[in-house]
Amino acid sequence: MTTAANDALVLDTAAQDLLFREARTANTFTDEPVTDEQIQAIYELVKYAPTAFNQQPLRVVLVRTPEGRERLVQHMADGNKAKTSAAPLVAILAADNEFHHELPTQLPSFPQAKDMFFSERPARESSALFNGALQAGYFIVGVRAAGLAAGPMTGYNAEGINKEFFGDGEHSVLAVVNIGKPGENAWYPRSPRLAYDEVVTTV
Amino acid sequence: MTTAANDALVLDTAAQDLLFREARTANTFTDEPVTDEQIQAIYELVKYAPTAFNQQPLRVVLVRTPEGRERLVQHMADGNKAKTSAAPLVAILAADNEFHHELPTQLPSFPQAKDMFFSERPARESSALFNGALQAGYFIVGVRAAGLAAGPMTGYNAEGINKEFFGDGEHSVLAVVNIGKPGENAWYPRSPRLAYDEVVTTV
């Protein structure tokens, strides 16, 4: 699929296509493995994108063993089980609700933020959810930057995944992402997008 | 600042630098205006990034008038007032909690999703928050793709902004983003990032 390039942008057209215009949510994948080196390359790039107070609450669990895959798939919605079983790699994205332990080292210019803003769990949870979701967005862009397709899903039993993989009660699953090279019939037809005037207003 | 390029990625090095490695949260800006054409170019690119059920809950209010700027700045935290007053353009990013009205046209393959999953406001709110935050992440990347610096902020009275700009009770502010070309002393020193092994685990 080719559409017009966007000349008002500085980002080159090939990068625009790779990250946004031609990238699609894949539903099937080839057997080609996704390596730890690729995931690390993605992380080392997208880690620089901003979060509030530099809190970086995103945590990633790579599901590599057959046992791990079984533990995950049982909690997926029926419509997501087959593709979650078949993808070369599956990543569980979660928010660390106890991110404040790292704040003094991660925000050396303002270490008192930990106690000023994040002494209560509800404040941490809502901040970790928002900033973890921001970082999930960056991560999806990063998967595409590695020439891979992402298949993000939110259809699962969240409580089940949290208990299964985060028994400490400190983490909340945000999304599960299939990762790999797109396979046969990987794409559904692209759905429409809201028009600019439906999304952007001016005051 | 130059650091090593990331060879395991397909995205070219210049694009890696533009979007992530050399991009920074700006705290001062030049007077150069940010045009509607630039914002539309950003939107027309990042609109393609995925959301659950293609729900696209992000809404953007561009604050262009002096009156609008005053109405916004009064609700910002003291430490954010000066830069929010001075930025060439400020965008309020919000989640539309009533996004389900658009679902039948935006997800033509599964129009019944509207009633199956989103008939209750709490379900819509949590979905709009997560997916709106994902889209806020894409939007920040898009601002950088336009060669502009973003200064995202969450330090404000959210209830005040919601009442001031979204009197319908249907929208929830997600972030306020200063946008422009970086000015003098625009950057604080870059804070550290968590190491790969602190973020990514394998099962």
Image (cartoon, coloured by chain):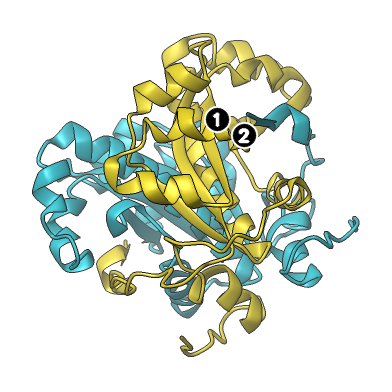
Chain colours: A cyan, B yellow
Q: Residue at x 82, y 40 (%)?
A: A189
- Residue B190's quadrant in the figure? bottom left
Examine the image and state in which quarter residue A7 appears: bottom right
Q: Tell me which residue sits at (56%, 72%) in the image.
A: A33
Q: Are marks 2 and 1 in contact (CB under 8 Å)?
A: yes
Up-down: is A188 above or below A15?
Answer: above
Residue A17 appears anywhere in the view: yes
Amino acid carrying mark 1 in the image: Gly
Q: Secondary structure at mark 1?
A: helix
Mark 2 residue element? loop
Q: Disc count in the image?
A: 2
| Disc 1: host chain | B
Chain name for mark 2: B
> Residue B25 location in percent, x, y?
44, 62
Q: Residue at x 50, y 28 (%)?
A: B128
Gap in Å between the C-alphas at discs 2 and 1?
Answer: 5 Å
The answer to which of B23 and A157 lies nearer the viewer is B23
Closest to the observer: A120 or A142?
A120
Residue A11 pos. (x, y %): 71, 69
Residue at 65 percent across and 75 percent down: it is B11
Where in the figure is residue A89, as x and y percent of width and height?
Answer: 50, 62
Q: Quadrant of residue A16?
A: bottom right
| Quarter placement of the N terminus of chain A | bottom right
Q: Which residue is mark 1?
A: B68
Disc marking residue B65: 2
Q: Quadrant of the C terminus of chain A?
A: top right
